């Protein structure tokens, strides 16, 4: 159900951008990205939050214009896996594998729009759907013994706020490449199923390095 909602959201945004691009005579630009994802939370350390990186994918849609400021729709998926030897305040889980899907709308500002290399900054808001699991692939949200069961309940669909910085390189009139870094704020401490029994205070964070290939549909 949640996956269907995300796909519907992506299709709706795609149709919206397509209609916008036709009416404004600005072609639709599609980006396909390969993402390396890591997380910062109760089971991570200063070392593992940069070393334990897992692959994901991203689809982005925007219109190709000469204006520096524009909108971008993103949808994607990924996961992270983390484990520690012991956890203070048992019975919190010491292992987690969390798979997630997301969709967001970002406001993007591009520098040097007429140059081959175009640095950019972006920020936006969207939805993140996640599912923490144990070593056997079972959903940890159903295992109340890993939390203060009477007190700790959480939603697996939450808002998320991505902030991105990167650079785009134009290859030719219809294609280009980009590399960027995204820091994704989430208002939840349960991406790893741990909050009150954890060793760190504050919300969990996802961050990622992404390489994308862009192609423009129609003549720019």
Image (tube, helix red, strand yellow):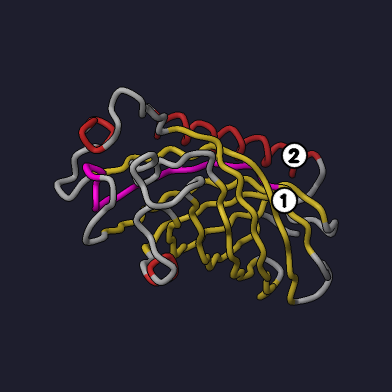
Who comes first in sequence, dot 1 or dot 2?
2
Element class at badge 2: helix
On-image quarter of the C terminus: bottom right
199 is within the stretch colored magenta: no
On screen, residue 13 versus residue 46, left or right, reads right
Residue stretch rendered in magenta on the structure: 90-106
Task: Examine the image and state in which quarter residue 83 appears.
Answer: bottom left
Q: Position of residue 25 (x, y in %)?
A: 80, 47
The residue tagged 1 is 63
Q: Residue at x 26, y 53 (%)?
A: 87
Q: Position of residue 199 (x, y in %)?
A: 38, 52
Q: Position of residue 136 (x, y in %)?
A: 14, 47
Element class at badge 1: strand
Task: Examine the image and state in which quarter residue 109 appears.
Answer: bottom right
Q: Main secondary structure of the magenta part?
A: strand
Q: Residue at x 84, y 59 (%)?
A: 66
On screen, residue 18 versus residue 189, left or right, reads right
Q: As displayed, is residue 214 above or below residue 62?
A: below
Q: Residue at x 55, y 65 (%)?
A: 212
Please state which of residues 209 and 189 is positioned toward the viewer in this rendering: 189
Residue reaching furthest left? 136
The residue tagged 2 is 20
**Few, some or many C-alpha atoms within 10 Å of disc 1 (few <14, some 14-19, many ≥20)?**
many
CB contact under 8 Å: marks 1 and 2:
yes
Q: Position of residue 207 (x, y in %)?
A: 51, 59
**Few, some or many C-alpha atoms within 10 Å of disc 2 (few <14, some 14-19, many ≥20)?**
some
Please state which of residues 219 and 78 is positioned toward the viewer in this rendering: 78
- What is the C-alpha distance between the residues marked 1 and 2? 8 Å
Please state which of residues 165 and 111 is positioned toward the viewer in this rendering: 165
Task: Examine the image and state in which quarter residue 114 appears.
Answer: bottom right
On-image quarter of the N terminus: top left
Q: As displayed, is residue 110 above or below residue 72?
A: below
């Amino acid at each position: 159900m949640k996956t269907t909602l995300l796909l519907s959201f992506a299709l709706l945004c795609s149709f919206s951008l397509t209609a916008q691009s036709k009416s404004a005579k600005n072609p639709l630009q599609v980006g396909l990205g390969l993402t390396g994802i890591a997380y910062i939370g109760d089971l991570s350390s200063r070392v593992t939050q940069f070393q334990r990186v897992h692959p994901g994918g991203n689809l982005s849609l925007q219109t190709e214009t000469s204006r520096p400021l524009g909108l971008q729709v993103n949808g994607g998926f990924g996961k992270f896996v983390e484990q520690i030897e012991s956890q203070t305040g048992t019975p919190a889980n010491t292992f987690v594998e969390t798979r997630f899907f997301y969709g967001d709308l970002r406001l993007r500002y591009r520098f040097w729009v007429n140059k081959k290399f175009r640095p950019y900054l972006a920020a936006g808001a969207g939805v993140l759907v996640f599912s923490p699991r144990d070593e056997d692939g079972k959903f940890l949200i159903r295992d109340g013994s890993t939390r203060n069961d009477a007190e700790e309940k959480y939603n697996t669909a939450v808002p998320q706020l991505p902030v991105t910085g990167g650079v785009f390189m134009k290859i030719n009139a219809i294609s280009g490449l980009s590399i960027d870094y995204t820091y994704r704020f989430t208002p939840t401490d349960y991406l790893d199923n741990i909050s009150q029994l954890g060793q760190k205070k504050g919300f969990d964070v996802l961050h990622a390095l992404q390489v994308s290939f862009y192609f423009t549909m129609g003549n720019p």
